Structures are given as structure tokens and as C-alpha cells.
Image: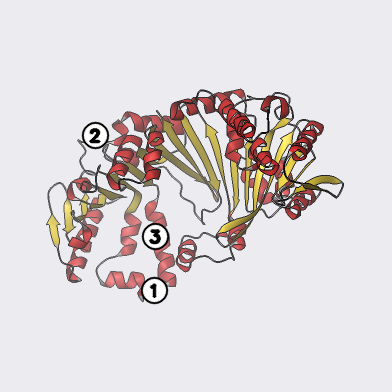
Amino acid sequence: MPASVKLRLVLPVLLAALVALLVAGCGGGSDDGGGGTDPANVAPPQAPIFIDFTVQPEAEAAEDLDALAKQIAGIDNLGDLIVTELENSASEDGEELDFEEEIEPWLGERGGLFLQEYEEDDFEGYGVAVQTTDEGAAREFVDEQIENGDEEATDGSYEGVDFKVQEDETTIGVFDGLVVLAEDEAIFKSMVDASGGESLGAETAYTDAVADVPSESVMDVFVDIGNLIEESGGEIDSEAELFLDTVGIEPDEATAVASLVPGSDQIEVDLSTDLSGDSPPSGDASELLGSLPATSVAAFASAEFGKRFDESIDRFDEKGIPSEGIGPNQLKKGLKQAGVDIEAIASSLGDAGAYVTGNSENSLGGALVLETDDADQAKATVSNLGLFLRSAGTTGVTKVTQGASGFAVRSPDLGRQPVVVAAKGSRIAIGYGLAPTLSSFQEANETLADTDAYNEALDALGGTPIAMYADGPSALRLAKALVPSGEEGFEEAQQYLRKISYLALGSEASGDLATAKLIVGVK
């Protein structure tokens, strides 16, 4: 194995943060601290992507990682497996490597990886920094690997920092308690500059974004959304730009952070972002979600849907929809002339939810459920929509009277089942398939809140209101029915997908910050 390739493997994060995380299981926690500089302090201030990760997690986190590996892949000790593979790979190429003797003594607790530029749908340039508890031992290891390798390396020095440049331009050095590797010499020098001046770690946008990451997190991914857009040329698809502007989102200065928190029987991903508009979603729609059919493969609910719907309609009306020939201030006026008072409808709407049912293409169904504060208004809204479709000459419209009041639209273009719009009590349901749609009104039927897996998901989310739920086994059955046979990637993934008992997403908002928590329950 060439020395450059070997270095990227044995310094866990040199290829990917995940590899470093897996290697971490071998050592357990460290009580005396990792020492060295925060890896973010050698990342350039405008880096659009930065991954901070724990190289040696606390004992509990290491045990949870091992427990997950055991349940998902039957691996007893994930760290030992990775280390063994690294050592065997080196041995096969005629180079002996002893991780415990050569790397573990100087390996610190944290590492960081940044991606520098985004051009032509790909990232160009990267840098990696891993804390070391012994600069001398780390430098000795790097020098020995390069000296024993097949490639020649050129010595260099910049601002008092010595480094080596290999034939493929990979540049590596040790300074400020960090082992630092970059794609080329220029990026390495930018990391040296960052360590003595302006860096990502000193940027307010970064420090604010990562200030509240969970203490149990073993990996945090920071994304500077505004900078990423700028790196890509500052262009946003016109329709996407219209949508963002409509909901009051300004992405130019937005950031997001995702954190990975392992558990013994679950994987948790926490997300926070200020990409949430003037009035980010708030409230709690978990009661609506729990009342949806127990047969749901997947379901979600959104609080205060009516308020946001009203705000969006106002913005659309103000700007118009040029692609549809609708000018400014014409949308609401045109609908009202057709008998649809969109303002009255929006003002009566509360929470909204949706669900999917079925285990095959033929049985696939589901519905969007809207809660209103006025049963009469709900019934009138559905009736007016039906009249509007008939007056517009829509064919295949029939009346629905059993189980709810409304109408169904049948057409070969819609598939085997009709699109149904119905109302009962204070609910409006718009769905595909008569039975799946009406099931949202059947109070005697079992709901998600009556199932064990859903309640496990609620417990896992803690105090975070649940907004989305998917049943693992049901989703896999549906996927197997819909994915064409012979898809190798899906066939290989099934052995792991079978281990998922549920997925749950909770969300809440405070000020202009929206947070979410994704839980993957593992059998």
C-alpha cells in the first residue's frame, strides 16, 4: 500500500469521519482530556461543511456503539473489527502496522474534517485535523510511515510549521496539538493561517450553531447554507426561490447542525437550523398524529397548518403565479368568484396530518387530514369544492354519503382508486382510495396511539412533540412490493432494514430556531 493511502487509513478520519467514529470503539473514554486545539480552529472561516467527531468516546457511548453493531450487523466489538481490518490491509501490502503500539498512544479525543469549495456539483478541497496527546510520537509515526513508503515526499515549512508533501500533493504536519492533513499544500497553509488568526471556530455563525449540541453526541455536522449557495454560484432554482420567499425563508445567512447520538437500541439524530422563516412551525400536533389509523405505514402531522397556509396564500396572491398566468392580487379574487373563499377556509383550519397505508401497489392509499374549528364550515368547504369541479366540467365526480359527506373523482389517469374529498365532524380528508380516506373518520378503529411501537417512539422522543412516524416492518413490506426485483442495492440493504422497528421525528421551534429529533428504533 502506498504511504499516502496508508496514512489516510490509519489516521482514522483522513478518509471519513465515520471511520474515525468506528475506530473509536476500541479505546473507550479518556479521563485526562484529548489535549490540543479545537479542530474547528484550523478550519478556514468560510468552510461550508465541517464535521466534528469524537475519536475516543466516553465508555457509555462506546458501549452503545458496540450494542448497535451487535444488533444491526452481529459484530461483537466494532472498534476491534475496524482496527483488525486496518492492520490486515497494511500487512497484505507488506507493511506491518500495530494500532495499539503505533497510533493509540498519541491519538487524542476529537477530530474535524472540512470541505472547502463547492464547484460543479462536487466539493473541491478538504482538510482534516485530529487531536494528539503527544506531538512528538505523532510526528515520529508520520515520518516513519513516509520514510518506509514507496513514494517520495518533499519537506516544507510555513510560519514555523514543518510539513511533508507527498507525490499526490497530500500534505501532512503536526502542530498545535493536532495531526493535520490536507488535500494539497495550499489548503494546509490555509489551516496554519487559521490557527493563528481567523478560523471557523471563531466565527459567530458557527459558535452559535453548535452551542447547544447534545453532550452525548459523537458527531456533529455543521452546514453553512448561505455559504454553500454562494459557493455553488449563488443560484437557486426559480421555483425553489419563489417557495422560500413565499414562506419567509432567507437562506443567505442560514446554518444547520446535525448531531449523532447513539443508544443501545436506537440511533438519534438531532437537527437545529435557523432556516425556518419568519414564523417557524410551533405547537404540538401529536394528538392528531396519534389519532390516525393504526394501519398507517407512515404518517406525519403539522401544528398550526391553517395559520401558515393563510400566510402562504397571502404571499402567493401578492406576487401572483406567472407560470400559471395568474397576476398579482388575482389568486384569491379568482377563487372567490368560483365560489371558493380561500380566506374563510384558511381561517378555520388548525392542525394537518397525512398518512399512507397498504402493502402493495394495488392496495396503496392514504389521505391528508385537516382539522377545522367549525364542522359546518368543513362540510360547506367540501360541498363548494365539489360544485367548483362540476362547474369546471370535471368528469367522474360522484357523491360520497357513506361514513362521511363529500365526493370522489374517478379517472384512468388517477389509477385504480378514486381521489376522495370528504368531511365529518370538524375534519376534512383528501385521500386516495375510498376506504383509506374514510378510515381517518372511523373512531372505533385502532389508531397509532393504540400500538406498542408508536408508544415506544413517543418515549424515545422524550418531551419533543412527535411530528412524523413510520413503522419499520410495514415500510419494508411496501418497499419490497414497489422496488423492482433484482435491485442489488435494495437486496443488500434489506438485512439492515429488517432491524428497524420504527422511525420517529419530533420537532419544535423557539424564536427563529427550529429543532428536530430523529429516532431510528432498532430491534
Element type at mark 1: helix
Q: Can you tell which mark lies on residue 446?
A: 2
Q: Nearer the viewer, mark 2 or mark 1?
A: 1
Q: Are marks 2 and 1 in contact (CB under 8 Å)?
A: no
Residue 408 picture quarter: bottom left
Residue drawn at x 48%, y 34% as measured from the top left: 267
Position of residue 439 measured from the top left corner of the image (x, y, whole percent): 21, 43
Task: Name the amino acid, label 2.
Answer: Glu
Q: Nearer the viewer, mark 2 or mark 3?
A: 2
Position of residue 209 measured from the top left corner of the image (x, y, whole percent): 62, 46
- Looking at the rendering, in which quadrant would you find the N terminus? top right
Residue 505 picture quarter: top left
Q: Left or right: where does residue 196 sit relative to residue 462?
A: right
Against 33, is 281 above or below? below
According to the picture, the residue beneath numbered tag 3 turns out to be 310
Look at the image and tell me whether residue 359 can be seen: yes
Residue drawn at x 67%, y 42% as measured from the top left: 2
Give 338 or 459, whichever is nearer the viewer.
459
Task: Name the amino acid, label 3.
Answer: Asp
Work out how far the residue at label 2 is from the one at label 3, CA to CA, in angstroms. Answer: 33 Å
Q: Which residue lies furthest to the right in this view?
A: 160
According to the picture, the residue beneath numbered tag 1 turns out to be 323
Few, some or many residues within 10 Å of mark 2 (<14, 14–19, 20+): some
* Disc on the earlier residue, 3 or 1: 3
- Looking at the rendering, in which quadrant would you find the C terminus? top left
Against 336, is 224 above or below? above
Give 306 or 132, whichever is nearer the viewer.
132
Few, some or many residues within 10 Å of mark 1 (<14, 14–19, 20+): few
Residue drawn at x 35%, y 57% as measured from the top left: 347
Position of residue 37 measured from the top left corner of the image (x, y, whole percent): 76, 39
Against 318, is 488 above or below? above
